[in-house]
Amino acid sequence: MGEARPDLTFGNITLVPGKRGGEYPFCNTLVIDDDARALVDPAAGRKKMTAVREQRDADVIIVTHHHEDHWWHSYLFPGAEIWMHEADAGAMRSLDDLFRHQGLNDPALREQWGAILKERFHFSGWTPRRLKSGETLRIGATVARVVHTPGHTPGHICVHFPE
């Protein structure tokens, strides 16, 4: 297991290291604090995400791809708008859409995995804003660019902060 690391801050962007070094089912989270507040992949751990929420709620959640270890704690920010790449966004409407997107066709596995996604990961489905490759994002005065990096999933992205 990875060691606990302190948060790292670069201007108004903070890296919140995930629990267990960001190993599954956790990941590292970015917090962008500006006039608006955005989180990238809010799945660093329930305690860490609750502490982030207690400091200030999020306006936007950017999810780099449709796997549960990247959107897990989004449910803690029910008022936040979800953004993700258009190639993965359709997978998040429902469990059926997610399973189709992942090519999971076995009914028994769908039932078992669906229960885990609902109970442990709090999946409830949503319709995200669809991001495009190269799109410029503005979180307050902070500028970020969507870099489409398919492979891990069809809609996997990186978020580049040119400044």
Image: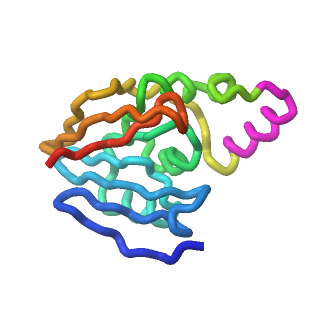
Say which of 58 and 42 sits in front. 42
Quadrant of the rendered image containing residue 108:
top right
In reply to whether residue 158 is colored magenta, the answer given is: no
Say which of 146 and 128 sits in front. 146
Please give left or right for residue 139 compared with residue 61 in the image.
left
* Number of marks in picture: 0
Task: Please tell me which residue is depicted at 38% across the width and 47% down the height of the picture.
Answer: 40
**Residue 79 pos. (x, y %):** 39, 40
Task: Please tell me which residue is depicted at 48% across the width and 46% down the height of the picture.
Answer: 74
Task: Please tell me which residue is depicted at 51% across the width and 28% down the height of the picture.
Answer: 154
In the rendered image, the quadrant that contains the N terminus is bottom right
Please give left or right for residue 103 compared with residue 134 in the image.
right
Q: Is residue 66 above or below residue 54?
A: above
Task: Please tell me which residue is depicted at 35% across the width and 49% down the height of the picture.
Answer: 39
- In magenta, the rendered stretch is 105-118
Please give left or right for residue 31 compared with residue 69 in the image.
left
**Residue 52 pos. (x, y %):** 37, 60
**Residue 45 pos. (x, y %):** 52, 61
